[in-house]
Amino acid sequence: MIVVVPVDPPRDGLVLSSLAETTPLAPSEARRLYEATTADVVRTVVSSGGELLVNYRDEETLPAGDGETDGGADERADAETAVRTLVTDALGEDVLEAEDVRFERQVGSTRAARVGNTVTHLLEREDHASVGILEPTAPLVARTEIDGAAMTIRRNEVVLGPAPGGRVYFTCFAEPIDFANVYTTPELGTLATHGADAGLNVGFAPMLPTVATEDDLCSTIAGLEARRAAGRPVPEATAAVVDELGLAVDDGPTIVRR
């Protein structure tokens, strides 16, 4: 299975902007968290049996005034360069070359259109047997979820990885569907309906949180703490940023500073 990770250029005010509005995180801290989760996700894909394709948004698909800048080199870099730098720093040049990691720009005016164009192109033009779309904000994903989905997609034409709140962190396709408005809330139900309407079998991967909302970030931090307590591996980049920023979960649950 080819695993597509759609990545926005890591810019303050563009990535994880809702966290900067609803939690103690500043826009620059939300950007650091996004960089860390993206690094962990691409490393996990490379460690799995999947082939990594980084699908970046370029300047044409970004909204006007897409983020605050501080004049630093990363902020001045164009979108493709910023994404390539992030992934290269996470994997290293040797891994990029050994794994033949691909970078392709996203095409389309909406998220649904961009995902639909990518999936349809890879299935119909490049003849891939299956395509996975893995969100870069799901650092708790492990190779077992990716490889498990690759097995499940052999029995089902659509596989959905649920996230809390009716969202998805992972979607896999062996056949294209009608992608128009597939991310209408709740995403999970909408995607399942579109798959069923196309006459396709729909399977499911394990549920995992992302860090896209405060509730999900709370769940992710709790997951990090639980894995540490159990002596299990944790996503290193994400865990490091959470520790450096002093993030913790309080009653509510809400994000607080230690």
Image: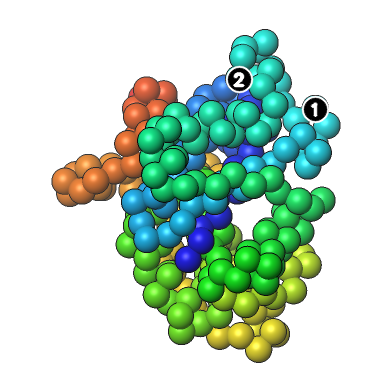
Residue 252 vs 243, above or below: the answer is below
Q: Quadrant of the C terminus?
A: top left
Give amino acid for label 2: Asp
Does the residue at mark 1 contact the one at mark 2 (Cβ under 8 Å)? no
In the rendered structure, find residue 178 and report the number of the disc placed on it: none
What residue is at 64 percent from the left and 47 percent from the top?
104
- For this orientation, the residue located farthest to the top is 71
Q: Which residue is mark 1?
A: 65
What residue is at 46 percent from the left and 84 percent from the top?
155
- Which percent across, then down, holds residue 51? 46, 56
- In-image side of 18 versus 219 (left or right): right
What residue is at 63 percent from the left and 25 percent from the top?
12
**Viewer-side residue, 242 vs 154:** 154
What residue is at 37 percent from the left and 22 percent from the top?
244
**Viewer-side residue, 35 vs 27:** 35
Q: Which residue is mark 2?
A: 74
Give amino acid for label 1: Gly
- In-image side of 186 versus 215 (left or right): right
- Which percent across, then down, holds residue 71? 67, 10
Disc 2 element: helix
